[in-house]
Image: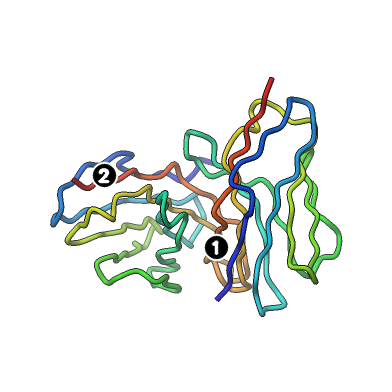
Amino acid sequence: KAGVTQTPRYLIKTRGQQVTLSCSPISGHRSVSWYQQTPGQGLQFLFEYFSETQRNKGNFPGRFSGRQFSNSRSEMNVSTLELGDSALYLCASSAGTGLVETQYFGPGTRLLVL
Amino acid sequence: AQTVTQSQPEMSVQEAETVTLSCTYDTSESDYYLFWYKQPPSRQMILVIRQEAYKQQNATENRFSVNFQKAAKSFSLKISDSQLGDAAMYFCAYEHEYGNKLVFGAGTILRVKS
């Protein structure tokens, strides 16, 4: 099976712009989670989607949003970008059957905000 | 809130030798899961090993094994016969039942010397 894919891999934006990142899960997986990785804050959970519904959410401002499509692909959007949003954004997929499952990560999207 | 602590920012090991990475966590839950992920320079997060809290037997995966001490809330990773390819950042992570929300430690950089 193909792994989790994320596009684009690299992105440069300026402050105030918005950005959309995409994640395609492993075939058959229905849950997609997003994480932000920065040198200062480490890895932090953003949100999780299952069957097109946000099922879990971390402590991020409303500028961070996401959605999931019927084919389980997910997008993450950040509006009004700030310098501090520069990070590696990782998505992970799992089967989504309910109990704790192993999450499989994509290669990440590196976002640089200037 | 659950927290995960990795007290060793950096560790070094000679090729073919054994190294142990430490992890402690804090939770009031009784059912949870613990993971070790590896992040090489490519930034791809790779699952190394997983442990269910209800299982007393320590998990093993080839050269990787854990020492899970539930009462002490400790979850260390032992890497035997270290190889150059083991060099990476290692993250300890916690997930509560029905979660899909991983809580990560700060990570330990492992360097392998030839």
Q: Quadrant of the N terminus of chain A?
A: top right
Residue A74's x, y, as percent? Answer: 36, 58
Above/below status of B43 relative to B103: above
* Chain ID of residue with mark 1: B
* Mark 1 residue element: loop
Q: Residue at x 65, y 51 (%)?
A: B36
Picture quarter containing residue B28? Answer: bottom right
Locate residue B60 relative to residue A49 in the image: left or right.
right
Q: B53 or A71: nearer the eye?
A: B53
Q: What residue sits right under mark 1 in the picture? A: B102
Picture quarter containing residue A18? Answer: bottom left
Q: A113 or A45: nearer the eye?
A: A113
What's the amino acid at mark 2? Leu
Q: Quadrant of the C terminus of chain A?
A: top left
User: From this viewpoint, which residue is outermost toward the top?
Assistant: B114
Q: How is the image coloured?
A: rainbow
Above/below status of B73 relative to A76: below
What's the amino acid at mark 1? Leu
* Mark 2 residue element: strand
Locate residue A6 relative to residue A28 in the image: left or right.
left
Q: What residue sits right under mark 2 in the picture? A: A112
Residue B48's x, y, as percent? Answer: 66, 45
Q: Residue at x 23, y 53 (%)?
A: A83
Q: How many marks?
A: 2
Residue B43's x, y, as percent? Answer: 47, 39
